[in-house]
Amino acid sequence: MASAGLEILGMILSVAGWLGAMVACCLPMWRVAAYVGQNIVITQVVWEGLWMSCVVQSTGQMHCQIYDSMLALPSDLQAARALVVIAVFIGVVAMTLAVAGAKCTNCTSDVSSKPRIMLGAGAAFGSSGLLLLVAVCWSAYTIVLDFHDPLLQDTQKREFGNSLYFGWGASCLLILGGAILSCSCRSRAPKDPVSIGAQYSTVKSVAANGYCRRDYV
């Protein structure tokens, strides 16, 4: 029962982390324009994501444009896009393994193979979380370096967007959920099959000169 509870908890955390990774991947808010000048009038807000950039006017209107070329993006956004896509794909594989190896399913006839499947699912979720964490931290590190670069103008500096916070939270959930799934499937020594020997009933033969008992074992 405890192992099943850990599996359910690990699955919930891992799926929540995977959904958070999808949100971080889709939202165009990885880098937000930072207005740190003294005489800047905020008329529009610039968002930069993995797939598009958006401009939000003070009136509430938003205009988004998909990037024309991936090679024209900064190196941190290119790496973040690749890592996040790989992390999401690994998360799909991990969920497939987790469903196949869950104790509440009958996907495999060999019960002893289910712990190994759950261990693989936990490792896959953890790998997905690590890739997402690398992508988010890399982007955050680049933003911090550019923010403190004196050669950049104030209008070119960026701050953390909401997608980074979603990415940090999702990576923590993926790593934690993967660790719980891995711990829930401790290797158990398979029980020795019960040897069913041939059982012979006792045969009694009646001889003419008396009773003779023969036991066959």
Image (cartoon, helix red, strand yellow):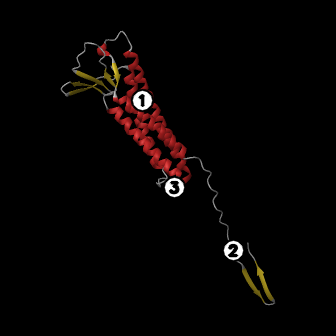
User: N-terminal of the two: label 1 or label 3?
Assistant: 1
* Residue 128 image position (x, y, % from top left): 45, 35
Q: The disc labelled 3 sits on which kind of residue?
A: Ser
In the image, residue 38 sits, relative to residue 204, either above or below, namely above
Given residues 105 and 49, the one toward you in this image is 49
Q: In the drawing, what numbered circle is on residue 200?
A: 2
Residue 97 visible somewhere in the drawing: no
User: N-terminal of the two: label 1 or label 2?
Assistant: 1
Which residue does the numbered mark 1 point to in the structure image?
A: 83
Residue at 65% x, 65% y: name it: 196
Q: Secondary structure at mark 2?
A: loop
In the image, residue 48 sits, relative to residue 180, either above or below, namely above
Is there CB contact under 8 Å for labels 3 and 2?
no
- Label 1 to label 3, Cα distance in Å? 36 Å
Residue at 43% x, 39% y: name it: 91
Q: Quadrant of residue 95?
A: top left
Please tell me how crowded label 1 is: few (under 14), some (14-19), or many (20+) other residues with Cα within 10 Å.
many
Is there CB contact under 8 Å for labels 1 and 3?
no
In the image, residue 195 sits, relative to residue 142, either above or below, namely below
Given residues 160 and 216, the one toward you in this image is 160
Q: The disc labelled 1 sits on which kind of residue?
A: Leu
On the picture, is 47 further left or further right than 143? Answer: left
Q: Secondary structure at mark 1?
A: helix
- Label 3 to label 2, Cα distance in Å? 33 Å
Q: The disc labelled 2 sits on which kind of residue?
A: Tyr
Q: Secondary structure at mark 3?
A: loop
Q: In the drawing, what numbered circle is on residue 109?
A: 3
User: N-terminal of the two: label 3 or label 2?
Assistant: 3
**What is the residue that sits farthest to the left in this orientation?**
59
Given residues 200 and 66, the one toward you in this image is 66
